Structures are given as structure tokens and as C-alpha cells.
Amino acid sequence: MKHNMLWKVACLVLVTAFVLSACGAPAAPATQAPANTAAPAAPAATSAPAATAAPAATAAPAATAAPAMVTIRWRTRPDNQAEQDVYQKISDDLSKQLAAQGITLQYDPAPVTGYEDKLKAELSAGNAPDIFWIPGASTADYATLGVIADLKPIADKDSNFKVTNYYDAPMKELQNGGHLWGIPRDVSTLVMYYNKDLFKKYNVDDPAKLAADGKWDWANFQRVAKEITHPADKVYGFSMSNWWGLWGWFVYSGGGNLFNADRTACGLTDPGSIAGLQFMSDLFLKDKVAPAPGIEGGPSETDFHAGTIGMYPNGRWMTPSDRANDKFDWGVVEMPKGPGGNATWLFWGPYVMNAKAANPAAAWTVMKALTSADVQAKVAALGTNIPSNKDKAAVDAFLGSKPPADNTPFIAGAAYAQGEIPLFTGNWNDIVNGQYQPNIDKIFAGKASVADAAKAACDGSNPLFKK
Amino acid sequence: MSKSRTREAIEGYLFLLPNLIGFLIFFAIPLAISFYYSFTDYNLFNDPKWVGLSNYGKALGFAFTPGSYQAGIDAGKSWFEAAGNIFQPNDPTFWTALQNTIVYALGVLAFSITPAFLLAWMLNSKLRGMTVFRALIYIPVVASIVGSALVWFWIYNSTSGVINTVVTGTVNGLNTLIFNSVGHPLVDPQINWLTSPDLALLSLIIMTSWATIGYDMVVFLAALQGIPNHLYEAATIDGAGRGTILTRIVVPLMTPTIFFLLITNTITSLQIFSEPYIMTSGGPANSTLTIVYYLYQKGFQRFQMGYGASLAWIVFGLIFIVTLVQFRFSNRWVYEE
């Protein structure tokens, strides 16, 4: 009898323990260490109102004891293990550097697949990192939802922080509406990767030479693409995925725009947009210099690595896979000049601060450190990212990361680039991915004329803009 | 209730408790919450705002626009096409996704159950090495969807994929042997398996069927081996051939298994998500956008969790109705002892 009772009690305790452990807080060190509430102890020289208040300085025997440590959890989306290792080392180094200010860093990387899904779930549950990287185009969504902090009040009081240290295009977008929604982690222009061996094999003009001679324009781009194309050998002059960044380039290069001037309506029916999309359509359907485009990162990109594609437009992030996979000589050149003049994208992604960060001052200090020239130089040396900080040391570190032999096309395009657009006047995914993309796909498949597809895209998307 | 019965009941509940708690926390409560969210405007971060049936109305409703008939006629459309515009769906993408999902489910049923049955029929013998064939056909079932999808990604590649390479080789061979000499060479079709809106869904159907056939075949095999030998012997004595035995003995006795696979495959197919997520992102031109992928887009990518939840419940309703209809008509063709 006693044995039975003991058994029941044990079961009950066990079950209760399971329930409590399931419902309780995670065991891992959370965003806020217990010491956080007392934390403004660290009167970080660079920052901000909380630091000046610093009640803990008087409360704690600071002279003899170590300062109360604030843990700042931060996240990036490393593309590979090497990049993750570099970020981990940066985090460890910064932890040592900032220890005197009472700040310790906890690096919390997340995989590329489902990155934003995980982040959104954490934000909703209230356990997202203090600082996290997001794609530039997503910035508006997070800002509109109020889940990231406006950094302007804290930045305005920080004389060491200058927005002019970073490229203009992302800073302009990040300061939308007089706010400051983040600090760019990195940037990348869109450039044309090309297979030098194929150009030599078919004795076709080298795009870099054409660019140096000022002849790298639509006409010559189309001509060399045709000359490279040999369908019997399954070799094509050009290829691209159906990702918006790539067909979007044709829009801007033709002199058009994805949106109207104040981004309250679709811009695909503008004459320049139509001209750009028509040129793109002709490459696929009339000139047949490119195989049908697949999804981003799919067959069109792997065909380039396989050596059967002459030219492939992409950002800097493709360089590591070129280095790893390409068994041929390759290079990069700026995008060809179209009727709309020189055009390219400046893709970017910022570090943003969780609106619920317990220690904004400490988080701000970490954000500045993560985007400082020396930290960006370490990441840039890997070759994956172009520093967002225009400091010469960071840029030089990037330019020295080879191959390709010449990295200057990545930097040169920044002068005239259209920055990646966070859409504060609507939901990017609903408008661009939901309405534009299916109609652009119809152009690629020859299922709709450019004019009809553009009209359908605009008819479908215009009601979705906030006026 | 006596003391011992009470104690027995408590003990029973205690044994049940761990599973019950898991069921409540991870299934029943989220289910109830998602049902509540489906009647709200909720973006994951705001407080859910009650909107009644408007999410369901947005998905399932139509707007009456009589003026669009004349506009259609003016645009040169036939009266039939113009009349079709009078009722405009509130969310046309939902209907595209629904249509894709139904076509996909029908395709998978057609391409998996019948071949699986025929395979099982062929492999239901005690010949040497038969287990190797069974194992080979079953392998796709244990392969991960992601791994399979990546392999098929390459198989379907329009320039260097296995299928198109074989097609190109065949076309070139025929041209060399026959058609070049008669002056009408065949043109290499360069089939765009995943990049053509006409073929992308079919490509996913073929891939899923390949992954499903193994499981269906094993179930059929088990059922075939459950048919008593004396039925075959009696039929043979009565002079029945292999074909007659198949149609008069085997198929009728297999109808419960066919019904089971019909139900389970339908339910699984209507929930299709991973394949379009990995291989096509729902494109091109929404041709592989399925309902579950669409609700994922709405809920997790576009911050419309309330609408996404309503789509989830519509999928549930669809599955429920389809299953109910299947059960309703099962007594007309399913053999029951």
C-alpha cells in the first residue's frame, strides 16, 4: 500500500516537473541576464541617456568589484560555416573589448532557410535577440509593426556616430520618416559575373574591355550574349533566376521604376519599365540567348558554375560559391548601360535593435562596434560582403579579397545604384512577390505580352498600396 | 463509486496524464487558438482584433460587378468570357491555389495508387531476389523530402538534367539515323519542367508519386499476402485465368486497402507544402502555389496570421468534406466481410 502511494507521488512529481519545465523560461542565458536591471552601470563613453543616469555606479562598489555585466544577444544570417566562425570570433573579441563597459556579447546565428520565420516567431514570443540582421527590403515591415527600435534619439546624442560613414542609399532608406531604423551591416551592388574562358573559346569581346572602352551597353551585351550562345553545346550567353532583383534591374536600366515617385503605386507600366522588361523578354524568347529562369539559387545559377553560361548577374554573395565551384577563369564587370543610363542595385541589410531590448544603450554600443571599420574589414576579408562602412581600411580589405582579380566593379556601381527598397507604403511580399512576380513569370514563359503582364501586375497591386 | 474504483480511475488518469498534457499543450489548445485567430485581424505582434467572418469572406467570397460585363465586351472578349467577370473572387490567388491543390491531389492519386497496385501484383511472388526489388522501390519513402527534391531539381534541369539529356540524345540519334536524310530534322524540345507554368505542377506530381509508390506498394503487398490461397486454388480449378483472378478475386478483396490508401493519400496530398516550398517557391506564375503554401506565405511572410489561420481551417473543411464523401460512397464499391 505504502509502495503504491510512493509510486503515485513519484509519478505526480515527475509529471509536474515535466509540465513546469515545459512552461518555464529557457535554460539558456536569456536576453537579459539577471544583472540587467542594475546594468546601466557601464557608463559607456559613447552612449546615451541611460548611461548618464548610471545609478549603479553609486550603488555598486565599482572601484573594487567587476561591473554588473549586461548580456547583449545578437544575430546574423551567416551563409556558411567560415562566415559563422568569423562572426563568432568577432563576438568573442568584442566581448573582451567591451567588458570594461560591462557588456558581454552572445552570438546567436540562425540558418539561411527560414531565417525570418524563426525571427518573427521569436519576436512574437518576446524572446528575440537584442540586435539582429534583417534584409533591407524587410526593414519597413518590421518598423511598421513596431518590433524594432527607432535609434534616432540615441544616435542624435552620440557624437561619435555619423550616418555619413555609411553608403547613402541604405542610410536614406533607414532614415525614412525622420527615424533611424538600423545600421547597415553590409552592402552589395549587382554586377555581371562572366566566364572568361567561354569568351575566349568563342572569340567574343571581353565585357571588361568593352566597359573600359565605354562600350558596355545593352547593344553590346545583347551581341556578346548571342555570340556566346551555342544551343547544340548547351551553352548560353546569359542566364538569370526569376528573382525580383534581377528583372528589377532591367526595369531601372530601361529608365523605369518599380514604383511611382512616392511609392504609392505600381511603376511597371511606365514606358521605361516596359522598355526594360521588353529587352529582357527578347533575350529569352526572341534571341534565345538564355534558358528559362528558375528560382533564386536554383538551376540557372548552378549552370553558371557548371561552365555553360557566359554571363550571370548577381550580388557579391555569389563570389564564395564561384571560388568553391568554378573550374574556369571568371570575372565581374558592372552591369551594362541601358537607355535609362547606368543602373544597378545596392542591396543592403541592417542590424536593427529589438524594440524590447532591455538595455538599449548597451545594444547601441554593440551595434556601432559591429559596424565599425575594423570589424567590417574582418568580414570583408572573407570575400562574402562589401563593407557598409566607407572607411578606407574596410574597403581596402574588401578589394584585396580575390578572386575575382578586379573587385572594383562592386564598388564603382555604388555611385549610381538604386538602393534596395523597403516599402513603407505597403507590404513588399504582397505587392512584389504576390502581384508583380506571377506576371513577370508569364513574360518569361511567353504566356503574356510585356504590356499585358505589366498592366495585370499594376491592376493587382495598386489597391494594396497605402495612399 | 467504490473506493477501489475511485483509486483505479485516478490511477488510469495518472497514466493518461502525460499524453493528455502533451495533447492539450501541443495540439488541442493551439488548434482552438488558431480557430479563434481565424476570426481576427492578427499580425503576430498586435492584439487580435475580432473581425467575424471577414477572413472567410475574403477567401471564399465573390464581388458582384455587373459593370465588368460591358467592360469585357468593349475589350473584345466573348460574351461568355465577359459574363465570367461579373462575379470576381475577393482573393483570386486563393482560388488559384485551391485549383492547383485539387489538381495536384488528383494527379498524385492517379500516378501513385494504380502503379503501386500493379507493382505489388508483380512483386507478390516468392521468386529469388524479389525482396531486393521491393526494397529498391521502397527507398524513396525513407529518403528525406529535401534530399529527394534536390535530386529531382537536377533531374528536371532544362539544360543539363537527366531527362532532357536523354531526350536530346534520342532526338539527335533519330535525326542522324532518319530525319536529317529526309530533310526534316526533329527539334530538341528542351522541356522546361520546373520553369514552365504548364509543366511545373505535373513535375511535382511525378516527383511526389515516385516518393509515394513505395509505401502504397508495401501496403498492397501486405493486403495481397492476406488473401487466402484457397481462393486462388478454387478459382484456378474453376478455370479462371490470371486476368480473371485479378479482376474477380484480387481487386474486390483489395478494395478496403484501396479505400484506405485513397483516403490517406488524399489527405496528405491536399496538405502539400514542402515540394513547392523547396523546388518552385509556388511559381512560375503561381502554377505550383498550393493552399498550405499560400497560408504559409500569408501568415509568416506577410504578417496576416488571422487570414492564414482561416485558410488553414478552410483546408481542414475541404479535407473533411472530401473524406466524408469518400466514406459516403465507399459502401458502393468497398468489399466488407
Image (cartoon, rainbow, N blue to C red):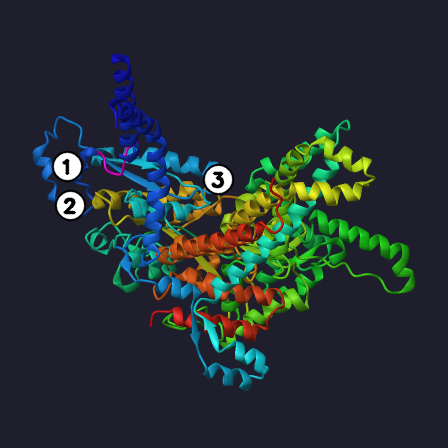
Farthest right residue in view:
B181
Q: Are marks 2 and 3 on the same chain?
A: yes
Residue with the mark numbered 1? A38
Taking the image as shown, residue B45 lies to the left or right of residue B218, namely: left
Query: What residue lies at 34% left-to-right and 26% top-to-bottom?
Result: B15
- Taking the magenta stretch, the answer to whether it contains residue A358 is no
Report x, y in % for residue A159: 21, 51
Residue A80 badge: 3
Mark 2 / mark 1, whichever is N-terminal: 1
- Residue type at mark 1? Ala
Q: Is residue A111 left or right of residue A324?
A: left
| A29 is within the stretch colored magenta | yes
Q: Which of the two residues, B28 or B70, is positioned nearer the viewer here?
A: B28
Binning the other alpha carbons within 10 Å of mark 2 as few (below 14), some (14 to 19) or many (20 upward) gives some
Q: Could you say where residue A19 lies in the image, as x and y percent from the top left?
A: 29, 31
Residue B213: quarter of image: top right
Determine the chain carrying the residue at label 2.
Answer: A
Image quarter where the C terminus of chain B lies is top right
* Residue type indicated by callout 3: Asn
Indicate the amino acid at tag 2: Ala
Read off the magenta span. A28-33
